[in-house]
Image (cartoon, helix red, strand yellow):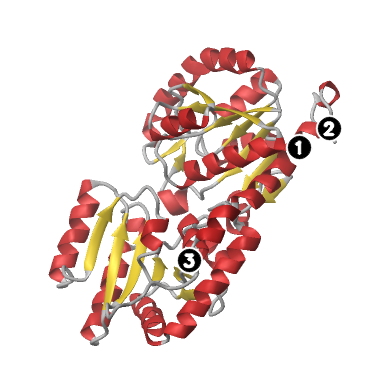
Amino acid sequence: MKVCFVTHYTHLYGANKSLLSLIDKLQDHSVEPFVLVPSTGPITDKLSSLGVQFYSLPHKRWMSKAPWKAPARLVANVSVLPFAVTKILKWDIDLIYTNSSVIPIGAVLAALLSLPHVWHIREFGQRDFGLHHDWGKSLFQTLMSRADARIAVSEAVRQRVLSDVQPPTYVVYNGVTSRERLDQLNPKQKESGGKPFTFAIVGQISPAKGQKQALQALHQLRQEGVEARLLVAGDGAAEHLESLDQLCQSLGLDDVVTFLGYVSDPFEVYQQADAVLMCSPHEAMGRVTAEAMAAARPVIGYNNDGTAELINDEQNGLLYDGTTEGLADCMRRLIEEPDWTRSLGENGQKKVRSKFTNETYAKKVYNVIEEVWCNGKNMTSRSCS
């Protein structure tokens, strides 16, 4: 089966990392992947290295923080449609797979070419990224309902984004590592060597991701005489980075906080830490949470949305109430009970093995694709087992 995947950006953040691992493992199920990208960049470099064909098409989003630019985006999308149609026909695509709710071109192409369409919903939109629908929520729901199937990355996304959309909708959690690599990840905590307990917070530097609260909680612990360090991994807008740096200086944390910048392999960060913080209040799923669990590092997570689905409180991590005091309290508990901390991490790794491997992820997505294909108009042209 030939499947055209449509992605909305080119950097190697969560959605594209999940897409790449999906493409890799779907090939084990005889899926031949092709990808439409908005421009060249890190993801096209990776696709080239994997031998996957792609086509750079400057398509635009239909959700943004600047809805007044909607007419210009619409014109841009209409103008590239002929090129996209030509490429889809040349590739002889069987099914179109849109990798995010923020782009409409996959749905339009599927309608124009009478191809089955699967829509993968990886974000809330407004709750997590402050995005608004260009043409209103009603049109969004109408187009979403016309997809042959929708995949939500969590139950929270299904309930908040797709509650008014026609079924079928499936919940499939992202895979974050292969079974082979999971076997290689060290389930033991790092050797302390007399060094303070180390926390890590990983992800894009943004007010929505909670790095500021992590610094404030660390400061509270330091005021109480509790020794701890924090690794901050990720990049972001210059003003956000400067703001965090200034806060770090004002709180006197320069000697215990390390800004690592963007790290291509976050597992390198998890292996340096004793525990990981997830301070974002509105994670659709929380890839970082599952990754840290894969590395046998317990996560202290904001008790809401997708994060609350991944963490079983006091079993494989801790959930906090969203306050700085609550976060600091959870951090203190892990520092004071190292054996329990290790046990939480080991339990988290067991959960990843059963729910969040790339192989499990790809198999569940393939089942959706196969069902859509076999129920579609073209089922008589190819065999369906």
Q: Name the residue under label 3.
A: 186
How far from the left and from the top, in percent, is residue 127? Answer: 46, 54
Dot 3: element: loop
Looking at the rendered image, the quarter that the C terminus falls into is top right
- Determine the residue positioned at 47% across, 28% down: 48
Write down the quadrant of residue 22 in the picture: top right
**Residue 383: which quarter of the image?**
top right
- Mark 3 vs 2: CB contact within 8 A: no
Nearer mark to the viewer, of 3 and 1: 3
> Marks 2 and 1, how far apart in space?
8 Å
Q: In the picture shown, does residue 52 fall above or below 137?
A: above
**Amino acid type, mark 2:** Cys
- Residue that carries the numbered disc 1 in the rendered image: 370
Residue 384's label in the rendered image is: 2
Kindly identify the residue that appears in the image at 65 percent across and 35 percent down: 27
Earlier sequence position, callout 3 versus callout 2: 3
Q: Tell me the kind of residue under disc 3.
A: Asn
Residue drawn at the location 32% of the way across and 56% of the way down:
233
With respect to residue 1, does 282 lie above or below? Answer: below
Real-space Cα separation, disc 3 to disc 1, in angstroms: 36 Å
